[in-house]
Amino acid sequence: ICNNFMATESRQVSSKFLFLKTLALFVFWVLLSGSFEWMHLGLGIIVSFVVAWVNSGHSPFVPKFRLWLRIFFYLPWLFYKIVQSSIHVTRLILHPSLPIQPRLISVKSKLNHHAAVVLYGNSITLTPGTITAEVDSNNLIVHALDQSLSEDFESKEMESKIARIFKDEKPDL
């Protein structure tokens, strides 16, 4: 049985890709630990390499530098939407009458890449007041606390930003 989300065969991994993955994990290690002792840094580089090596041959989707750069520039906009939704949900919760209007909305996406749909669903879930409840190919079922929150993804702004991120990727849906 072939699963579209999992690689069934391991693939050759370039040493450059392995190095970049190790470096990213090591930087994350240092940021989380905050320790600059040699013993701790040595352990961090070893663990980072092992984790990068173990995980390098299993993903069927190898992101390219441009894709990562586009995602990096997408994140500030997403962070803005998260803050905006947080303020809105806070107002809803603190309002004496609790004016929520929960709804389930079926969202038909035009995204044509699995990773794009995953990013879309995760972006919706990260914004407070909305949760992607189900994903089937490029159809998403989303729960929203009120009409205002559902307008954010019904306007297709988030979807179009994600489509621009994956514009050069070969469709796999």
Image (cartoon, rainbow, N blue to C red):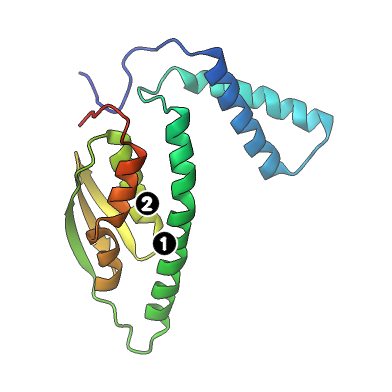
x 71%, y 42%: residue: 33
Question: Callout 2 environment at 10 Å: few (<14), some (14 to 19), or many (20+)?
Answer: many
Q: Position of residue 138 (x, y in %)?
A: 19, 42
Q: Position of residue 63 (x, y in %)?
A: 42, 28
Question: Is residue 146 in view?
Answer: no
For this orientation, the residue located farthest to the bottom is 96
Q: How many numbered callouts?
A: 2
Local SS, label 2 = helix
Question: Is residue 74 in view?
Answer: yes
x 43%, y 68%: residue: 84
Q: Position of residue 85 (x, y in %)?
A: 40, 67
Q: Which mark is residue 123?
A: 2
**Closest to the observer, 43 or 146:** 146
In this image, 15 relative to 151: left or right?
right
Q: Which mark is residue 54?
A: none
In this image, 57 relative to 45: left or right?
left
Local SS, label 1 = helix
Q: Position of residue 37 (x, y in %)?
A: 83, 35
| Label pair 2/1, CB-CB below 8 angstroms | yes
x 70%, y 29%: residue: 44
Residue at mark 2 to residue at mark 1: CA–CA distance: 9 Å
- Residue on which disc 1 sits: 81
**Closest to the observer, 37 or 83:** 83
Q: Quadrant of the C terminus?
A: top left
Label 2 amino acid? Answer: Ser
x 43%, y 76%: residue: 90
Label 1 amino acid? Answer: Lys
